[in-house]
Image: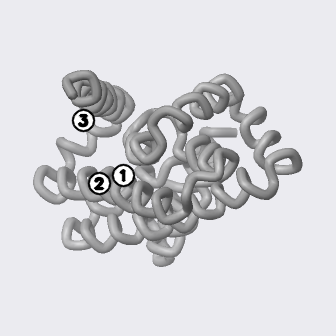
Amino acid sequence: MLRRLYDWAMNIARGRHARWGLAGVSFAESSFFPIPPDVMLIPMVVADRRSAWVNALICTIASVLGGLFGYLIGAALFEPLARPILEFYHYGDAFDQLQVWFDEYGLLIVFVAGFTPVPYKVFTIASGVAGMFLPVFIIGSIISRGARFFIVAGLLYLYGEPIRVFIEKRLGLMTALFTVLLIGGFVAIRYIR
């Protein structure tokens, strides 16, 4: 099933409605869809480097809007919709851990969410369940998702095809490493004070 979804997303990335598809996938991935928008963003930027910044902006805006939908699912539709989504993807344990982290770190969790291999939809739903202050959620989402998509687009703009291969092979590792360093920095700051 995942392979068919991946192939579907790649076909849209090559079509004349690619930007609408990019926006749709970015929106859906933030609340329920399993395929990240990178599978469309990467080939679209490699095909036309001049489109890098517009495509990153589309991903960011649509992803934040999709995150708001995920927030709504968590806040108002947990039992009928959020729980089945979390169970379908086997994210129950990750969700439980996020609830603990929300109590402790708040905004930092939403910021980190944009870079981690843990799907963003889990964070958006958890934000709604936790009742995170909506403006804080939106600002954290804009910063984290924007940084993620603009970094990917910028690397592709600068280095083209060779960086595409590198990113596709190591995106999970790179984002996990960045996240560990980021969290380590915040933990160090917390204990240095």
What is the number of the mark on residue 147?
2
Query: Which amino acid type corresponds to the residue marked 2 in the rendered image?
Result: Ala
According to the image, label 1 marks what residue? 144
Which is nearer the N-term, disc 3 or disc 1?
1
What is the number of the mark on residue 49?
none
Q: Quadrant of residue 188?
A: top left
| Residue 94 on image: x %, y % | 61, 27
Q: Answer yes or no: is residue 64 visible.
A: yes
Gap between marks 3 and 2 measured at Cα = 18 Å
| Residue 75 on image: x %, y % | 73, 55
Mark 3 or mark 1, whichever is nearer to me: 1
What is the number of the mark on residue 166?
3
Residue at 47% from the left image edge and 54% from the top image edge? 37
Query: Which amino acid type corresponds to the residue marked 3 in the rendered image?
Result: Phe
| Residue 92 on image: x %, y % | 71, 28
Q: Nearer the viewer, residue 180 or 148?
A: 180
Query: Which amino acid type corresponds to the residue marked 1 in the rendered image?
Result: Ser
Using a 10 Å C-alpha cutoff, classify the residue at mark 1 as few (fewer than 14 neighbours), some (14 to 19) or many (20 or more): many
Gap between marks 3 and 1 measured at Cα = 21 Å
Gap between marks 2 and 1 measured at Cα = 5 Å
Which is nearer the N-term, disc 3 or disc 2?
2
Q: Is residue 32 left or right of residue 108?
A: right
